[in-house]
Amino acid sequence: MTDAIRGMGQRVESLSHGQRERLAYIDFRLYFFGELGRPDLIERFGVAPAGATRDLALYREVAPQNITFDGSNKVYRIGQAFSPLFDHASPRVLSALALGFGDGVDAAQQPLLPCESPTALCNPRMDVLAPICRAIHAKQPVSIRYHSMSSGESERVIAPFALVDTGLRWHARAFDRKSGEFRDFVLTRIETPTLLDEEPPVNERPDSDIQWTRIVELDFVPHPRLERPEIIKMDYGMTDGSIRMRVRAAVAGYMLLRWSVDCSPDHRLKEEQYRLWLSDPLALYGVENANLAPGYQAPSSFKKR
């Protein structure tokens, strides 16, 4: 650890908790969005404009290499020599991005009540996730090295526009210039992401992604093999005996796998984890990742039993 880095850490530790929280938020916004303005601090913490100005000045004093001011647009942007001032733990960052809270302060924060949840086995590296987030926010393509299970390692340029949590891992939904298609890129398989200073053409934008813009309605009912379907109705808060979900076609297969929904036409999956049945498997017609759904059969392969 250099004397400069050690000095920055000591300076941050000497601040009040409130100041550290606001500086961590500045650090978070720069790292994962590439920019922030004074209104962002005002909205997040309810501070006065003068207080937000002082916080930004303090951050610039502590980590001048991390931040630059764009006078023409009156926003602060990430510095070319940016190095995060705080330890942004992967689960907290992903939670913040998905749920809209969190800032990186107190990475070891204890839950308010005793709470256990499954440990994520597959976490993306922050130096990959951060530039992908900046690319999504800035609507810019990014060059990457990608490791594919089917084609191996390759150099690609993608235009990412959303993150997708499958429950097991995180993807970036993006247009892939190599294949000329919209695809999902597993974040843990991405290396050396570099933003490109250009704007994606119309055909690479989310409005052109048919699987992303298509909304699929899925109707779930208690699995017919269960002897007490009324308990399943209680579990899921069903009204009229079913629960209806509306999801993007691009994520439908992942969600059905995550929720353990039997999608076979004859509800033939008998394992204990299948408490729900997709009452109309034809709802998945045309969904490209429908093969991920448990028990799914293409309509042409439906058989009468």
Image: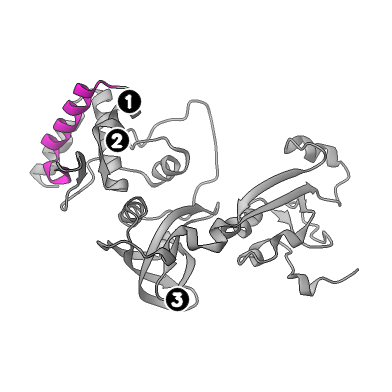
Q: Is residue 275 visible?
A: no
Mark found first going from the N terminus, 3 or 2: 2
Magenta-highlighted residues: 47-69
Which residue type does callout 2 highlight?
Tyr
Label 2 belongs to which residue?
25
Query: Which residue is label 1 attached to?
Result: 45
CB of mark 3 within 8 Å of CB of mark 2? no
Quadrant in the rendering for residue 156: bottom left
Q: Residue at x 85, y 47 (%)?
A: 226
Q: Position of residue 5 (x, y in %)?
A: 14, 43
For marks 2 and 1, give the one nearer the viewer.
Answer: 1
The residue closer to the viewer here, 34 or 228, is: 34
What is the residue that sits farthest to the bottom in this orientation?
Answer: 151
| Picture quadrant where residue 94 is located | top left
Please state which amino acid type lies under the numbered disc 1. Phe
In the image, farthest residue toward the right = 305
* Tag nearer the camera, 3 or 2: 3
Element at label 3: loop
For disc 3, the marked residue is 179
